[in-house]
Structures are given as structure tokens and as C-alpha cells.
Amino acid sequence: MQHPLVALMKKPSRLVIGLMSGTSADGVDAALCRITGHGTATKVEQLGFVFDPFDTCVREEILRLAGGKEATAADFCRINFLLGRLYTETSLRLCRECGVVPKDIDLIGSHGQTLWHIPQPEAYLGQTFRSTLQLGECSVLTEAFGCPVVGDFRVRDVAAGGLGAPLVPYSEYLIYRSETKCIALQNIGGIGNITCLPPACKPEEVFAFDTGPGNMVMDAVYGAITHGEKRFDEGGAFAAKGRVHQPLLNLMMDDEYIRRQPPKTTGREYYGPAYVKRIMEEAKVRHLTDEDLMATVTAFTAATIAYSVEHFFPVKPDELIIGGGGSMNATLLKDIGAALPACKVMTNEQLGYDSNAKEAVAFAVLANEAIFAGCNNMPSVTGAAKGVVMGKISL
């Protein structure tokens, strides 16, 4: 019997599902792709996309565990298999909506849900090291689909001395690079991350890093303002009613992470509940209206992006392409455009791509590279000592 990976590699093209649930913990993104080739010869066609929001109780439990609250090993055991089941249900729905039989899926790539991320070395029990934890049991997907599943990508890069993030720049390099323009790609999920593709760049010339909070602080503030009735400010409509409070924005920009030189990555550990509580207390002391507070935290995300471009880009971008959930926030897009007047700011949709599916597509691509044993991290981005094959394969 032929080895399943050998058979998969010999196929002219593969049907691949990519799965992503990000730091916003809002739900599961699933993209169905047809992938031909590998490495720089990779061709990707997106065939479908679905999003399944987490039930409120599931989201609250993820945020509880990701917030460093008291928990037991049993809690992480349960959430691992629950997430595996939810990823499976979303993948099956994707197949139904695309008219694809599950047995025809060749490969699945799943990022998993980040529960904790320690990108900088820390001392622990006599040793010093970096660490990261993503959960969402891949064996549940393998059992349901009967195909190879690649997951838990970040840990290999971390083991090689990298930050384990961002991981999307590899697929961005394959899909977006230009011979004549400097292209910047800003993803705005829970955390914002930016990629710089200099003109005619080689893989080792690509760099990327987390700019700071994307939607995370905005969503948490709006959730508090609405007493939990709303998860996010749809379209930035509420923020549009307010005025930016410059002194509070200046205080927020006086931030060690934002000033830190790349490579760098961040998460809920830094911009989570304690950070949001501090900002809301400052707003109360300064007598901000709710609308002005939302306008200010929205402008903060835009300001972190502009700061990143102005201070860390060796070549100023000709185009800044916005993706992720934040690309649907008209007020945020307006703020970004105002903060970067010399750069053409656009969304993925204006180029014919799907902002919502971008990260899920990326993990389909990373899984495809893994089965070909291709290095799918970017050391110039993560700071890893070398290129490595990220992803654990379940057969």
C-alpha cells in the first residue's frame, strides 16, 4: 500500500481545508482551496468559505482560559477536544455548502486556538525558554475526514528560537509579491500584524511583525459599553459618533511594545482584560463619553499601524492592503488612511480576494507545504535560527 503522503504529493492538485480561530475568539473560519504545486510554484484557488461563531458559553470559556484565570488540567483537556469537534462541524458545513463530499478532501490545515503565548524567553524551574500553546485536537478531524491533518504550527518555529508568529507572511509572499512595488499587508484580527514585501523580494527579505491590538481592545471596550450585549462595533458606526481624545491616545501610544523593534509578537497576555480595565479607568477620570472612548480606541489601532510603517519599514509601501475582520470597520479604515496619507490604502476585496478567508487560506497553504517537507516559516519574520517545517501531521 502506498504511503498516504506519497499519494497526496503525486496528485496534480489537492482539495485542502484551512481552519483558523484567532485571538478574538469569535468563532471558526474555514476555507476550501484547490492547491496546485508547492513552494514558489504554489497556485491557490479559493472555492468556498464559512464562518461559524462560537456559542457565548464557549467563547467565555476560551477567554477565561486565555486570560490566565484559575484553571485545571482538566479544563484544557476538555477545551482541546471540544475545539476539535467544533472545527470538524465547521469543516463539514463547508463541504456541504461547496457541494463536496468529505471523503474527497485531501488535506486539512488547522491553526488551533491560542490559549497562551510566551514569545520572549522566561525563566522556569531552572531553565529559560519561549513557549506557546494552541489547542483544538487534530485527531478529531482526522477521524471524521480520514485524510491527513496538519496542526500545531507555531511550536516548531518557537523550538527553533522564533517568536512563533506571525505565520501568514509565507502565504502572503506566495500570493501578493510584486516585481515593481513595495506591498504592505495589514491583517486586523484580534491582534494586528503587518507584512512588508519589498519590490522583487526574496523570501529572506520579507519581514513582518505584530503591530499591536487589532480588534481586541475595540471589541472589549464596546462589549463593556454595551454591558455585553454587543461583541463589536459593527462598521465602526458607534466610534464614528465620537471624537478622538488626543491626550488619551497619546497615553496609549506611550507603550513599550509599540516602540519595541521587530521581530516581535504580542497577544491577549499584554492587551487583555487588565489593559482594557486600565484604559477605561483613564477614560472615566478624563470624563470621556462612550462615543469618544470608542473613537479613541479605534484611532489607537490605526495609530499603531502608522507608527509601524513610519518607524520600522526600510522602504515605504506603495500600497497597504487591509485584511481580517477590521477591514469591515469603515471608521478604522478612514483613520488608517488619514494616518498614512502617502500610501494607497485598500482592502483585499478591492483586489478580488476575501478578507475574511485570508488566514484560513494561509493555513491551507502552510499545511500543503508541510506535506512536501518545505520550510514554511520565515526566519526573517519570526527571528528563528533557520527555516523549519512547521506543523504536526495526523494520519
Image (tube, helix red, strand yellow):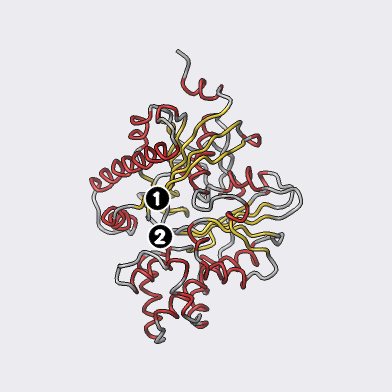
Residue 128 locus on image (x, y percent)? 43, 50
The kind of residue on which mark 2 rests is Arg
- What whole-number distance in Å separates the C-alpha atoms at marks 2 and 1? 9 Å
The kind of residue on which mark 1 rests is Thr
Q: Name the image quarter holding the N terminus.
A: top left
- Circle 2 SS class: helix
56 and 351: which is toward the camera:
351
Q: Name the image quarter holding the C terminus.
A: top left
Q: How many marks?
A: 2
Residue 265 higher or lower than 79, as above or below: below
146 and 72: which is toward the camera:
146
**Residue located beneath label 2 in the image:** 268
157 and 57: which is toward the camera:
57
Residue 379 higher or lower than 253, as above or below: above
74 and 370: which is toward the camera:
370
Q: Is residue 375 left or right of residue 129?
A: right
